[in-house]
Image (cartoon, rainbow, N blue to C red):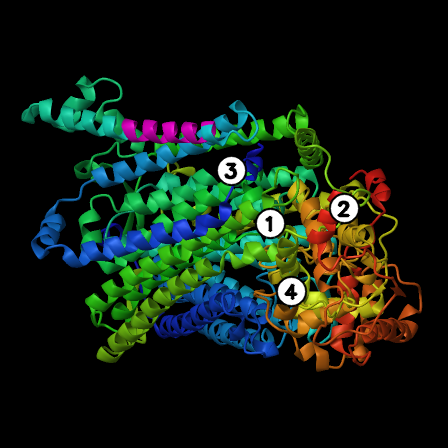
Amino acid sequence: MSATVTDATPSIQMEEFEYDNKIVRNFAIACVVYGLVGVLVGVLIAFQLAYPVLNFDLSYTTFGRLRPLHTNAVVFAFVGNGFFMGMYYSAPRILKASMWSKKLSYFNFWGWQAIILAAAITLPMGLTTSKEYAELEWPIDIAIAVVWVAAMINLLMTMVNRRSEHIYAAIWFYIASFITVAMLHVVNSLALPISLFKSYSIYAGVQDALVQWWYGHNAVAFFLTTPYLGLMYYFLPKAANRPIYSYRLSIVHFWALIFLYIWAGPHHLLYNALPDWAQTLGVVFSIMLIAPSWGGMINGLFTLRGAWDKVREDVVLKFMVVALTAYGMATFEGPMLSLKSVNAISHFTDWTIAHVHVGALGWNGFLTFGILYWLIPRIYNTSLHSQKLANFHFWIGTLGIIFYAVPMYWAGWTQSSMWMQFTEEGLLKYPNFLETVIQLVPLYILRGIGGVLYLVGFIVMAYNLYMTGRKGTLIETEAARAPSITSVWKPSKDEYWHSRTIERKPVLLSILALIAVAIGGIIELVPTFMIESNVPTIASVKPYTPLELQGRDIYVREGCYLCHSQMVRPFRAEIERYGEYSKAGEFVYDHPFQWGSKRTGPDLHRVGQKYPDSWHYNHMEDPRSMSPGSLMPPYAFMLEAALDTSTTGAKIRAMQTLGVTYEKGYDLIANQELMKQADQIKASLKESGIETKSDREIVALIAYLQRLGTDIKGNNTVAVQSGL
Amino acid sequence: MKFKNYLDSIAGISIYPLISLVIFVTFFVGLLWYVFKVSRSYVDEMKAIPLDDGIVKKTVLTMLGLFVFPAAFAQGAEATSYQNVLWYTVLFGLACVIVILSIVMVQVFMLYQKLTTPQHLQTAEVQENTTPMFSPVWWRKFVGFSTPLNKEEKILLAGHEYDGIHELDNRMPPWLQFMFVGTLLFAIAYALYYHAFGFGELQAQELESELAMADIQKKAYVEKMGAGINEENVALLTEGPGIKEGGVIFTEKCTACHAADGGGGVGPNLTDDYWIHGGDIKDVFKVIKYGVPEKGMISWEKQLPPQEMQKVASYILAQLHGSKPAMPKAPQGELHESPVEVPENPVPQAIEAAKQ
């Protein structure tokens, strides 16, 4: 304030406007409520992995359906609302202007809550695209795009109509997040609808995987990282009452971060059936991300220089320091996990789960808590109800993170080691996958306890904030005065170039940010689509039969991919355990791909024809009858549920549109073919003394499972010829 | 980059989680005990210790130290022979010791400086002019605190004020810049190593090397131990602990499909005289080894060593066959007249044979 106001001359026009605190309060409530729900579901599914009985024998509450609910609730509901809360508080104050449109602000709020509600209803119903963190079906995807872009326009127009000469770093991060997430969301969600709640990804196999992890990785970057860095740039200096450590560092780390982050997606697919060049890009860009990521942490921690004694007293700063430290740890660990040799150990194990939870519980969670403890008393014009409870929250939350992360790191190492260990005879030491899972149960219980500790802290915070709100009264709107932009607009020639150009021009800033984030994506995605040698075709790979296709959709619906990969990596230990490693050409008809990212159960890519039909039937009814000690939820409801064959024709036609080579007119006879194959399976089950009808869901699922990976069985020459 | 192979040789892995649990719980119980026991005055005393930038300094040093670890890992991976875990651990330990020592050295050095510098010389300007390289001043600059706290107004950016937030114009910490340049160089070198010069193995070649290495090891093992049991030379075990061990394996691996008493379920009944693929020890061994994939019997070749397959086959023929299961599945296959005469009481017969 000081510089502009004290220079006041008669020509300066003071303008009056208001800050809307009600929208901030609304988002804060949504953030806390959905955060609680998200953590609670997380605790439930954590214990499901130790006690399968907690799946309650209901289709709606199986791990496969609740896990997406957990991730979506935490990412989009908790962190999403947290971001909006902070943004609607900080952006108007930084820019010295009311939000451009109050209507858009409230459209943003109610639209976002409606989307979350729709997610909470559809995900347990099994309506899912099976693309991780993008599971919601196409109508909800469209709603997300609309609401998100509305919020973006609101921010951009506020930037245009601001009263501050320059635009502060926090806003750069906000607008870059909006632009990038819009781009990622639209490209990744492109799908062909066959009904109101079912669609097929327009990409197949390798391409689908690449697009999905380009999205998935950058959802972490631009939904969980950059928006929160923006919040950090506002709330940390406010809470510590210290100037930001380095303006230059914020410029360099902002541009380096958004440019480099986009490229790192393929590190989620190391040693998978992805071209080597793409994997290498994923590795090297991840390594280059260390310093730009740490730039944020350093700029935050060094801002506290001279204020460390405050950290001892102030619970807000305590939360923020742990958040930044967790951010620093996670962004160092991430690049390390991207090294192929480390990834060979960590991929598909709980190590990844530990890694993301250091980020989610530490960075996102603790920064949100810090902001809430700072912000709620301010907008209610009172002081925090209880510092003691807040301190209790801090310590139990920190303990919760440690109790969560440490057992998961051990679990990851243990399981990976067991997968890879051979005996002297050259056989797998632990050939039965189950042995490697049962080993982890005690660690899963400990992890659950960590989650409970974190949840307790969360509940205490909710109570504390509620009491704070009751004590004070909400200042719904705050009046403010500032000189008009024309009266403070004094560009000078010797001004630093970044201040002179980019920080004065919001549209230019947005365009440059879009260019920075578009480059990496274009260079990685386009060649994979255009150049055929990247996905060598295999002659013996044929489209799925109608029954298998229906079975595949059940596999997708139940979220099997959350615990079972379909990707045998080219390691001796995996070939020995599962069979021939997976080739890129095997997935050309997979809309969407089902490679998975975690093996709580074994890989299924070569499970076809490995067990008899009856084994699968019994195993689905009660997994523990065939695999004693298994952690899989029972799927007995599939034995009774009738298969919906009314969609078969539409599904075949959709696949044809997407380029799957069914003959013309096949959709008309698809259901006859389906029944023929179903009758065969029924007969084979009967031979083993199992009576079932052919039109049950279990029959379709068995058909799909028995087909998996069989196209090139005993046919390795084809694969060799095609260059893999 | 053959890091993953080092795990092959960690034996007895199953004890790890338990050890980790014990360490973990012990640590926290200890911590809790300490927290409850600690006296109030001690806590107050600790609270009163002034916090200055030393904390940050140490943190940054430790983080820098962390960088030595990956370097040590890479060194170990290149320098040692396959599976040499001990050497590798020693290197790691050495790296840790070096890092800790250097941290201690720097701290001692700084303390020494502080103690020996006369009070009136302890202003920033004087130090800047007189102290040699790697002095505390150099260190402060390297960390990123070249401007002392009390001179901060000099680098406060004019015209940058946002809702009370100001910005300092500190230069970027040199160590962070070096790190950034270092990772850029690493990225270029990595890409060239794998794709331009072809030094590094891409994943397909890597697999070939891994399989070749495994073959060599397996051959060496067979040479040492002599040829193993196969379907040509397998013999029925009729007594001794082998049958019992076979039973244990059967309970663990086979009961899901063949029932605990061999009466069958998903798979056929193993107690009757009817066999789908022959009831000889060699036949049964063969079915276990290779499986009958088209009928759903899986192959156990990769899961069980030959001796164990022999034990299971023997257990089936000697123990299960002829027993009375609770819920026998209907006979399948052809009648196989008593595959091998299992003598009622083998010991006297053997004695008789010996007499003759």
The kind of residue on which mark 1 rests is Tyr
Q: Position of residue A593 (x, y in %)?
A: 70, 57
Magenta stretch in the rendered image: B87-102
The answer to the question of whether label 1 and label 4 lie on touching residues, with beta carbons closer than 8 A, is no
User: Residue A672 appears at what percent x and percent y?
Assistant: 91, 75
Most distant residue in the front direction:
B355
Residue A637: x and y, percent?
66, 79
Marks 1 and 3: CB-CB under 8 Å? no
Query: Mark 2 or 4, which is nearer the eye?
Result: 2
Is there any visible trace of residue B282 in the rendered image?
Answer: yes
Camera-nearest residue between A628 and B194: A628
Residue A171 in sight here: no
Co-location on one chain, circles 2 and 3: no
Chain containing mark 3: A
At label 2, which amino acid type do we have?
A: Ala
Label 3 environment density (alpha carbons within 10 Å; few <14, some 14–19, many ≥20): many
Total numbered labels: 4
Q: Which residue is mark 2?
A: B353
Residue on which the image places disc 1? A430
Point out the image quarter for the N terminus of chain A.
Answer: bottom left
Which of the 4 image quadrants contains residue A404?
A: bottom left
Disc number at residue A560? 4
In the rendered structure, the residue with mark 4 lies on which chain?
A: A
Alpha carbon separation for disc pair 4 and 3: 32 Å
Q: Quadrant of residue A142?
A: bottom right
